[in-house]
Amino acid sequence: MRMVLLLIAVSLIIGMVFVRRGVASEGSPPRAEIIPHEFQEHGGTRTDNYYWLKERESEEVIDYLTRENEYAENVMSHTTAMQKVIFEEIKERYKKDDSSVPYLDNEYFYYERFEQDLEFAFQCRKKGSLDAPEQIVIDENALAEGHHFFRARSASVSPDGHIAAYGIDTKGRRFYTIHFKDLVTGESLPDLIPDVTGQVVWSNDNRHVFYSRQEPSTLRWYQIWRHEVGSETPDVLVYEEKDDTFWASIGKTRSERYIIIHLGHTLSTEIRYLDADDPFGEFRIFQTREMGHEYSIEHLGDRFFILSNRDAKNFRIMETPVGRTGEENWKEVIPHYEDVLLEDMLAFEKHLVIKEWKEGLIRMRIVPLDGGEHHFINFGEPAYNAWFDENPGQDTELLRIGYTSLNTPESVFRYDMTTRSKELLKQTEILGGFDRDNYVTERLWAEARDGTAVPISIVYRKGMKRDGSSPLYLYAYGSYGGNMTASFRSYRLSLIDRGVTFAIAHVRGGAELGRAWYEDGRQHAKKNTFRDFIDCAEHLIAEGYTSSDRLYAVGGSAGGLLVGVVINDRPDLFHGAIASMPFVDVVTTMFDSSIPLTTSEYDEWGNPNIKEDYDYMLSYSPYDNVSARDYPNLLVTTGLHDSQVQYWEPAKWVAKLRAYNTSDNRILLKTNMEAGHHGTMGRFARHEETAFEYAFILDLAGLLN
């Protein structure tokens, strides 16, 4: 009786009648049943009416998600033709028979290629020369047959080139099975290692591999094992990380001299290393973990280079002799800079190459190891992305780098570090009449409310009028120190060519402007991330790039959190929004140490067991702050098997938004019932979801035709 009265009271408050099964009328949205679940926290009570949606195996949950999908398809049915047009456009821009630039590693040239309409790659190699016969290492298309979801890790080949080890995930929850293939006979070996991360590293004896394993429930990578190929001897656990705020991964130095266990925490690192010639040896600690100290290493000859933030917020580079890795032996090579973030490095026989960030842009610094003057590679565009491409060898003066910008397709260059000459090896061919000169890219700076300048990268088709009439797709992430780069994506042309401007707000919480940029957007400074996004949106409106009835906020995962916060804080600022795999139930998730990405992320979001952290997270958590207001149009997407943001967060959020929304705007939930965090895989199939999202935006913008 008390439950009935409670349901009636809630219905009266929000002016709606909730129905458990079916919909109120044809075309109306599903209504999730209200079953109050109370949390007793820090002397108070917090109620979650949709907590029951956590039961992944429940028939009622699956039924609800299915009805949400049916509703979304029904609402969007008038865009079906446009979705097909967009999908075909995206597909036709791909060069069907294409391949990557080969790279030489241990006498073989490795590359991947695609054929016609096949979804997945052929991982291939040629011995000694590109004119040699091709050998298919892995045929991903054959492996994918019969699976609704498929993802393969790149093959790891034994040093002698005889055996390939590769991981396959057919569920989407990032549990891989490692397989082995004899590349001499072409036969699959009987060895199978199920339910692991898919990481594989070979010892130099060509007989043993090391791999990492995750906890079944939290999915934290926590164990490193050794497996002898072809042996029935049980695998050996060589390391287990007991601290549940750390994760463990396995790798190998580019020199191929050492196998590395990387133990990571949001704010701390510990590396353990083993001579790759001695798989039965003991891993040695490089430098003992210490909270606040992060570092990575690169081996070259008789020394290690260390990228460390010890007394250097933006990191500096040190070196130490092999065998004397303790910090007391470190000597500075590259100093700390207040305005430059050192992010990564590669060591060659004669040069050290540093990837760094200054004023929100990537730089690559070439440092001669003989003491000569350093120089930078010139990229020559206002907004772009650059990265280290495949560089397996160290005895070379040739550096391979990748490059792209908002209007430049992905390119691979070979750069001579001595002559400073740059050679284009390949630029991805975009079919369908693409001409980069038809697009304008800009770098803008918005002033945040506290006076901070926030960069914005933007691209639009020539002829766009800055009179506020252009629809604008504003994307951001802003967490984990992850930098959002201005990269080309051919599928975006389906929006831009129809008059939609695309922009990235480089908000605090990333590290584009240095480590302080990250520190200013995490834990108790997290609200700067959301405020920056709002202030960037208002700047774009003030400058005539768009207007509030033409502006669309977009973000995924932690970026979905951002979307959830800003539509609570400023629903009037946006005509619509898309939140993909959104992390929106912050407090409940961070209280639950049994699910992925909780204990290891206290230093990112806070620990809700601490009252001060709890209060701060609760003050912005999108799910907890839904209230009666006119919400903008919203599309929320998720995957039933998502291993990072559990499907129930967006599902509960949509249910609550529906209950409180006072506008007539559409709120849609679309769940991929076969996939995980990154949705459908395959170079073409994944864009059916892209086409759905773009049709949602174009429909709202009045650009369906």
Image (cartoon, rainbow, N blue to C red):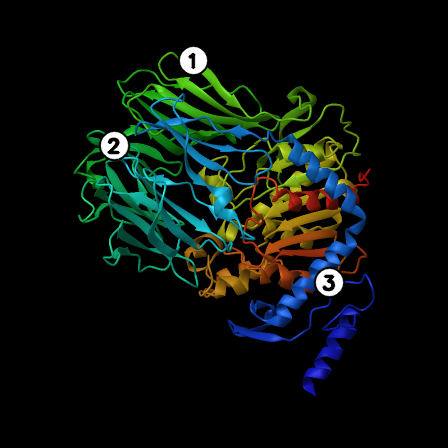
Give, as a three-letter code, the residue at label 1. Ser
Q: Nearer the viewer, residue 165 or 143?
A: 143
Q: Are marks 2 and 1 in contact (CB under 8 Å)?
A: no
Distance from Cα at disc 3 to Cα at disc 1: 58 Å
Q: On the rendered image, what quadrant is the N terminus found in?
A: bottom right
Horizontally, residue 659 falls left or right of residue 441, namely: right
Q: Are marks 3 and 1 in contact (CB under 8 Å)?
A: no
Disc nearest the viewer among 2 and 3: 3
Give, as a three-letter code, the residue at label 3. Arg
Secondary structure beneath dot 2 equals strand
Q: Earlier in the sequence, mark 3 or mark 1?
A: 1
Distance from Cα at disc 2 to Cα at disc 3: 57 Å
Horizontally, residue 441 falls left or right of residue 700, namely: left
Distance from Cα at disc 2 to Cα at disc 1: 28 Å
Secondary structure beneath dot 3 equals helix
Determine crowd level at label 3: few under 14, some 14-19, many 20+ residues with C-alpha closer than 10 A. Answer: many
Q: How many marks do you count on the picture?
A: 3
Note whether 187 is above or below 331 in the view shown. Answer: below
Q: Which residue is mark 2?
A: 319
Q: Position of residue 129 (x, y in %)?
A: 36, 22
Q: Please identify the quarter of the rendering in which residue 671 is found.
A: bottom right
Q: Which residue is mark 3?
A: 658
Determine crowd level at label 1: few under 14, some 14-19, many 20+ residues with C-alpha closer than 10 A. Answer: few
Q: Earlier in the sequence, mark 2 or mark 3?
A: 2
Q: Which residue is mark 1?
A: 421
What residue is shown at x 44% (from left), y 25% (from top)? 401
